[in-house]
Image: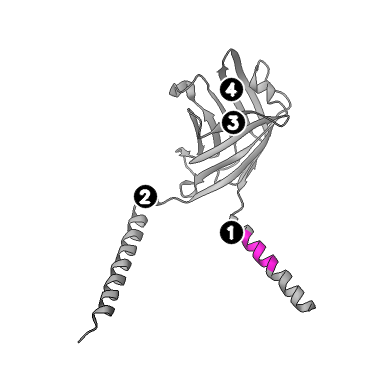
Amino acid sequence: MLNATPLKRLSQATATAALGFAMLAAIGTDPAHAVNLKTFNISGNFAPAALDGSVGLPMNLANGSFNGTYTVDMDQLPTSSSFVDLTSWTVNLVNDNTVLRTLSNSLAGNTAYIQENILAFADAGLLTKQNHDLYSLELYFDRNLTGTGSTNDGKFLDNSNLGSVQSSGITAVTFAKSEPVPEPQTFAGTVVVTTISLWLKRKQKA
């Protein structure tokens, strides 16, 4: 006579395995789950002077800089002509260690995307009627962007109304760089290797 306990365990294991395979199959065939998210650091510098006729923020950003991070689905890059929306981003426009403007997915009207060789962060509130602002930071790379690259071509374009202060014009970008954020496990692995190396050296001395 067969023992009922092993059969019960086998039945449970089979059901668990079947459920696991079903979940994997669903993830593998559902495009909504097929994401390969990666985060990049973005930084750069603005020109010493804004274009003639500029007022407000473009003038204040002269000799300034920008820095931040953005996250994108790598499986959608490089693009041919379509827009690939960034999943999250925060970019600060800075001068004299003061943040003059922030572009972020947490702000109403903000959008950001990669299209071929263009990386752009914008507030299109004037178009979406979220606010009265319309400005963008646009970076133009030499080739279709896959997250990593540098360029000397770009601009901050502004046409916004901050209360009673009109701000409009263009400030050129003289340099910009996009590079991956270091993976946490890479740092942890380095710490482990260093610790083991130190331990071995101490053991050899002993």
**Span colored in magenta:** 188-195
The residue under label 1 is which amino acid type? Gln
Mark toward the viewer: 2 or 1: 1
Give the residue type at disc 2: Pro
Residues tagged 3 and 4 counted as in contact (Cβ below 8 A): no
Circle 1: element type: helix
Give the Cα distance between marks 2 and 1.
27 Å
Q: Is residue 34 above or below residue 49?
A: below
Q: Which image quadrant is residue 92 in?
A: top right
Q: Residue at x 68, y 17 (%)?
A: 52
Q: CA distance from mark 3 to mark 4?
A: 13 Å
Q: Residues within 10 Å of mark 1 (few under 14, many from 20)?
A: few
Residue receiving disc 3: 102
Mark closest to the chain's N terminus, 1 or 3: 3
Three-letter amino acid code at the position of disc 3:
Thr
Q: Which mark is residue 185?
A: 1
Residue 110 lies left or right of residue 203; in this view the side is left
Residue 187 can be seen in this image: yes
Residue 76 vertical placement versus 109 (above, below): below
Q: Nearer the viewer, residue 53 or 129?
A: 129
